[in-house]
Amino acid sequence: MKKSKPTMQDIAKAAGVSKATVSMVLNKKDDCISEGTRARILAIADELNYIPNSIARSLSTNKSGTIGIMLPDITNPFFSQIARAVEDAASDYDYNVIFCNMDNDIAKEVKYTKLLVSKLVDGVIFVTGGRSPESVKILENNHIPFVFVDRHVQGFEHYSGVYCLNKDGSYEGVKYLYKKGKRKIAFVTGDKTLSISKLRLEGFMESAMELGIYREDWVFYSDFTIEGGRRITEKVVATCDEIDTIFYSNDLMAIGGMRTLRAAGIRVPDDVGVMGYDDIAISGMMNPALTTIHQPIYDMGIQSCRLLVKHIRGQLKKQKIIRYAPEILERQSI
Amino acid sequence: MKKSKPTMQDIAKAAGVSKATVSMVLNKKDDCISEGTRARILAIADELNYIPNSIARSLSTNKSGTIGIMLPDITNPFFSQIARAVEDAASDYDYNVIFCNMDNDIAKEVKYTKLLVSKLVDGVIFVTGGRSPESVKILENNHIPFVFVDRHVQGFEHYSGVYCLNKDGSYEGVKYLYKKGKRKIAFVTGDKTLSISKLRLEGFMESAMELGIYREDWVFYSDFTIEGGRRITEKVVATCDEIDTIFYSNDLMAIGGMRTLRAAGIRVPDDVGVMGYDDIAISGMMNPALTTIHQPIYDMGIQSCRLLVKHIRGQLKKQKIIRYAPEILERQSI
């Protein structure tokens, strides 16, 4: 049994014609071919599931019809929703999407970037940390367009990207909590090295200071995961019994945190209010449903892919930044 | 400004040597090159971020170092966890992963399959419906190895795949509920055309019939989504007020269902018990935490990728099926 893809040669043999004739028919340059032969060739191609190899074309055009998305972890609902949007938009342009889980690991990021470049990806969507200009530099030197989503990379702030205003979100979040009568707010941010953690913390600090309710010992750092939320909440519960609210800077941490609070017999929202950030799909299903800062996650993914395709096609000569305003989504956890 | 990838020619020019010399150094056939020249060439290659193009090699070897994963929807936590595992395993072998969202849409599936074949993917992981032998036939005719995960495709039951025993899961689930004193159990399954819906329903029916508690009018169909769970639960609540338990055949439906029950003032587990299926990461965070049928989702993804790579490398001549036994995971919703 032959163990490779069906070729034009296989079709020619089955149809009893030359490979040149098959090529003319499949490439629709078949004015001089009889209708009967044409139909026979197409039927055989279909029967054999002949699919032209696009790799040869990639070599001559330097385009692969593939884009890459680099993100921390596809199992985080925030990133899977962005990935879904990017793939939906890419599919409209007949692009395929390679996804890579970075885990905020620079070595992994660089390795993947090189792999993507070697495969001639046409562009890359970057949803990463902000610590790693190295990968971006590699793309730039190889003239591969890229677009940031949600988090920029330090030193590349003026490059194309789609963001939701992180500082504004937590700034407004504190004002909302204040209006609800909250004065003793603990804030949990993510990994210190991520730009997004810094921005959300900055918004919190600025707002809390303006309102005269800022306390440095009520600021906590953790990971942007359910487990990170559980772990840090144990610490919050153990160290500050005065607080009336915990403002987590993402929903996953808030979800893990609510579980820990429940286990400790602390009622939400009666004893302590909980505020999240992101509005991932599951947040509305929590009990109590999570009050959070809504970001248009899917839209951000769609826009980033469209921006990237414009760069790839040379339709966008300058860098472009799209900024969304976050919104407070009131549910039951405050 | 030159707008393409740095080439060996660029390195040669910068180093003042011939392209042949650069090629020898970069391909490590540099015994005859002086250490000084070798070092200079490598430094320049690094500075320019020169990355060899792997596409030319793909053409001659018919291997791209890329695999595809076809799944219904990456935002469903069950599938994102499988995708994550596949990508983790693939990364160990230096493979990249292209992901495609099928939405249980056959036309989309066929389109993507052809696209993947045209890009010379080395293999495909299939996590789809079961209605579509067409895509699998295309892969087979192009001699591209594939492995099923979670759901087989009708007519291809004997091909390589990694499954958790779906029928056993719901069969044991009903026995567990019976032991807990439950006698009036409504069962919600997914899309009728999916093999997985049928198997889970079969297990339920067999078990409930054996125990003498089966009622046809307490079987419901919906989609395997949060929204599907919400919608069908409204119907369950409206039509059967006698039931003491709702057994959803996936966790997402159970999560949506619990929200609807809560909104209707029905307490879980006091008024009605809720059982899920899958054990996605978020299920333990629910309030009450969801009792469910645990599947080793991450392991299933890892094993499927390893199986695929063995097929690609010709290390596995026969088809191989791996079956996991599901386990009941007792939490607080029953």
Image (spheres, coloured by chain):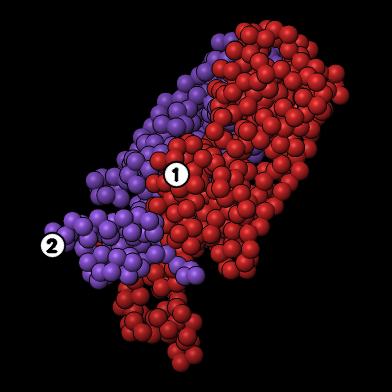
Chain colours: A purple, B red
Chain at numbered mark 1? B
Pointer 2 indicates a residue of which chain? A
Q: Which residue is mark 1?
A: B109
Q: Mark yes or no: residue A72 visible.
A: no
**Are the numbered discs 2 and 1 placed on the same chain, yes or no?**
no
Q: Where residue A312 appears, x then y in whole percent?
A: 30, 50
* Residue at 73 percent of width and 46 percent of height: B324
Q: Position of residue B105 (x, y in %)?
A: 45, 37
* Neighbourhood count class around disc 1 (C-alpha, 10 Å): few under 14, some 14–19, many 20 upward: many
Q: Residue furthest bottom?
A: B32
Q: Few, some or many C-alpha atoms within 10 Å of disc 2 (few <14, some 14-19, many ≥20)?
A: few
Q: Residue B72 or A34: which is nearer the viewer? A: A34
Judged left or right of residue B328, residue B247 is left
Q: Amino acid at mark 1?
A: Glu
User: Of residues B308 and A206, which is closer to you in this image?
Assistant: B308
Q: Nearer the viewer, mark 2 or mark 1?
A: 2
| In the depicted structure, whether residue A322 falls above or below residue A126 | above
Which residue is drawn at the image coordinates 62% and 8% (left, top)? B238
B47 shown above or below B245: below
Give the labeled residue for mark 2: A32
Cβ atoms under marks 2 and 1 closer than 8 Å? no
